Amino acid sequence: MVKALRGIGIERPSYIQAAAYQVLTSGARHIVLADHAGSGKTLAYLLPLVQALREEEQSLCDSLTMRNAPRVIILAPTTELCAQVLMVARGLAKGAPFRSIALTGGFKWRTQKEALDEGVDVVVATPGRLGEHIKAGNLRLDQCRAVVLDEVDVLLGDTFAFAQQVAPLRAAAPEATRFVLVTATLAENVYLQLQQDFPGITPAFGPGLHRTAPGVLEQLVDCSGGDVINEDTGFERKSAALLRVLREQDCTRTIVFCNKIETCRKVENLLNRNGEDPNEEGLLVLPYHAAIEEVARSKALKEFLAPPMDGAKMVLVCTDRASRGIDSAHVEHVVLFDFPRDPSEYVRRAGRVSRGAGASGVVSILVLGRQVSLARQLLERNQKGLPIHKVPSG
């Protein structure tokens, strides 16, 4: 395991990784892990769970990989997050051999079925595709040791859907199966629901919960002006501000967040038109939202997240889909073209920069009218080292 960690560049665990390891190896039944974006939560739960699989095999002196019966199931809300988790899992597998696969839409059903038939230890899946494989008889849960719900607050966004997704898993899995719930934000009402659904759940909270990461410079950009604000004038003012902050920051990787797909489209057109100006250095504008087909969306994200080459500048224009756990190690600048609908989403968006120890980045917040005072209150709490909103008491 030490060799595997060094192979993926980990010399010393983060706070949440150390805390999770202690809790997950202590025998606690159900666990909730919560810390800020970029704190290393994926590895925090994967390492001890994989270690437990290896120790079980070593005690029996035999492989426990079985056809159609994974021992760990990890649920994530998006295809892209599943791919990211799978990449971390396969990095660990270099030092502690185990089989893993992602089950998501947009990829061949037959290939997934064949892999399950051959036997896998760890399945990373979106809820919908996992349910389809269970219903088809390609996957059973009688050997499942642990179920991880990554980005559990997103899955809980629709309480009814969450119950529909989790209830069949709990019914089909052995009574002893442990649930590990992972999130970057944890509102009090969500934590209360988790306590009801998983009595006796053990918390492991990091010090960065509901805080932006160290190294993030936040700048408020008031686009109100002196005239009457309507949808058209508001967009025009924010458009001018967006072009200005992009020039000022001059970063190779920038994410622009919008609240709606319609706004994403308008911002994409704006940036593409600006890129045609011979007096401006061109930007590669990449859309990333639900209106884009999955294959094209994944291709755009892969291109954006790749290490910068030759100073090429890319801007990812997206909805909050990109704030869901995507590891954006090379992003230097985040622009909130639209002010987020709730404080938790601000934390997630801002968490796309300054990921990892010693990292830094800039968050530009474009605001209008009443949003100005809300944004100032939020930034004041950050500057005082206070959480954006209350952290549940463990």
Image (cartoon, rainbow, N blue to C red):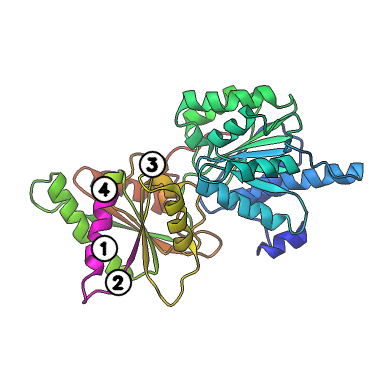
Magenta-span inclusion, residue 284: yes
Question: Which residue position holds label 2?
Answer: 282
Q: Say if mark 4 contacts mark 3, CB within 8 Å.
A: no
Q: CA distance from mark 3 to mark 2?
A: 33 Å
| Residue 122 in sight in this render | yes
Q: Which image quadrant: the C terminus?
A: top right
Task: Give the residue drawn at x 50%, y 52%.
Answer: 326
Foreground: disc 1 or disc 3: 1
Disc 1 marks a residue whose amino acid type is: Asn
Disc 4 marks a residue whose amino acid type is: Thr
Q: CA distance from mark 4 to mark 2?
A: 21 Å
- First in sequence: mark 1 vs mark 4: 4
Residue 179 x, y percent position in the rendering: 66, 33
Name the one closer to the observer, 353 or 370.
Answer: 353
Question: What is the quadrant of residue 255 in the picture?
Answer: bottom left
Disc 2 marks a residue whose amino acid type is: Gly
Question: Which residue position holds label 3?
Answer: 343
Q: Is residue 341 left or right of residue 84?
A: left
Q: Which segment is the magenta one?
A: 263-285
Question: Which residue position holds label 4?
Answer: 263
Secondary structure found at label 3: helix
Name the one closer to the observer, 210 or 133.
Answer: 133
Secondary structure found at label 4: helix
Residue 157 higher or lower than 268, as above or below:
above
